[in-house]
Amino acid sequence: MKQFILIIGILLSSCLAGYSSDIKNDKELFLKLYQEEKMAYDLYGEFYERWSLSVFNKVQLREAKHVWCVERIMDNYGFDYNTNTNAGSYPDREIQKIYDELTVKGCISDLAALEAAAYIKEKHISQLRERIRYQEDEYIVKVIFLMESAAQSHLRAFVKSIRLSGSDYSPVFLTDDEFSNIMKSGNKNEIAGH
């Protein structure tokens, strides 16, 4: 995670001046990324409060850093955004609906909460891959790539916890091959299961 923050910092300092005119056209992208990261942060906090599984707390702490990074990007470009939203409250209706549905699912059991967390991470990876396909701005491509890398790590942590619970997770948004490749990648220093 320190590496993620460091890389974002380096990208910010080295790329901001060169891409300022292009990135302003992508304000909506960063506002969406901000809300998605905040929603994940709020969701994992809710699940940790309810089930006390350390994986939720560990990933939530990392999501806080992702929210901070996206805030810094938006600050550097002078984007207006609302950081005063309450936990579980989002201007984007789609994000609000997803949060509401997954919160209800996550209240059923700790396994259901882990499945909801894996679901949202897998969805996020799929969305990031779709967004990067249409990006020409090198800076935005790098940011999205780093966000996807972090999301893959979180997905592996949630799936590992699901498997430690004696169950398994089947991909919804990714192909079996894409999912399998994500599960095989990673390193020993990633977030532990329970």
Image (cartoon, rainbow, N blue to C red):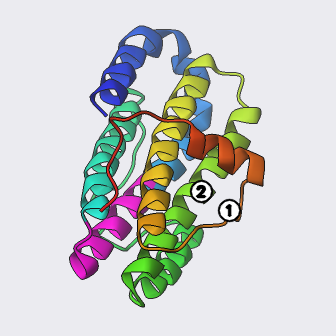
**Residue 71 shows in the view:** yes
- SS at mark 1? loop
Measuring from the top left, give residue 149's x and y in whole percent.
Answer: 51, 36
Measuring from the top left, give residue 62's x and y in whole percent.
Answer: 30, 46
**Label 2 neighbourhood size at 10 Å, few (<14), some (14-19), many (20+)?**
many
Measuring from the top left, give residue 190's x and y in whole percent.
Answer: 36, 40
Q: Do the residues bearing badges 2 and 1 touch, measured as CB atoms within 8 Å?
A: yes
Q: Is residue 55 above or below residue 74?
A: below
Q: On the rendered image, what quadrant is the N terminus found in?
A: top left
| Magenta span | 37-53
Query: What residue type is disc 2 on?
Result: Glu
Q: Is residue 51 above or below residue 187?
A: below
- Report the disc number at residue 122: 2
- SS at mark 2? helix
Q: Is residue 125 left or right of residue 134?
A: left
Q: On the rendered image, what quadrant is the C terminus found in?
A: bottom left
Q: Is residue 152 above or below residue 6?
A: below
Question: Marks 2/1: CA distance?
Answer: 7 Å
Query: What residue type is disc 1 on?
Result: Pro
Q: Residue at x 34, y 59 (%)?
A: 41
Q: Is residue 67 left or right of residue 93?
A: left
Q: Is residue 152 above or below residue 50?
A: above
Q: Residue at x 45, y 87 (%)?
A: 104
Identify which residue, 179 or 75, lies in the foreground: 179
Choose top left, top right, bottom left or bottom right for residue 108: bottom left
Q: Main secondary structure of the magenta part?
A: helix
Q: Nearer the viewer, mark 2 or mark 1?
A: 1
Is 39 part of what is drawn in magenta? yes
- Report the disc number at residue 171: 1
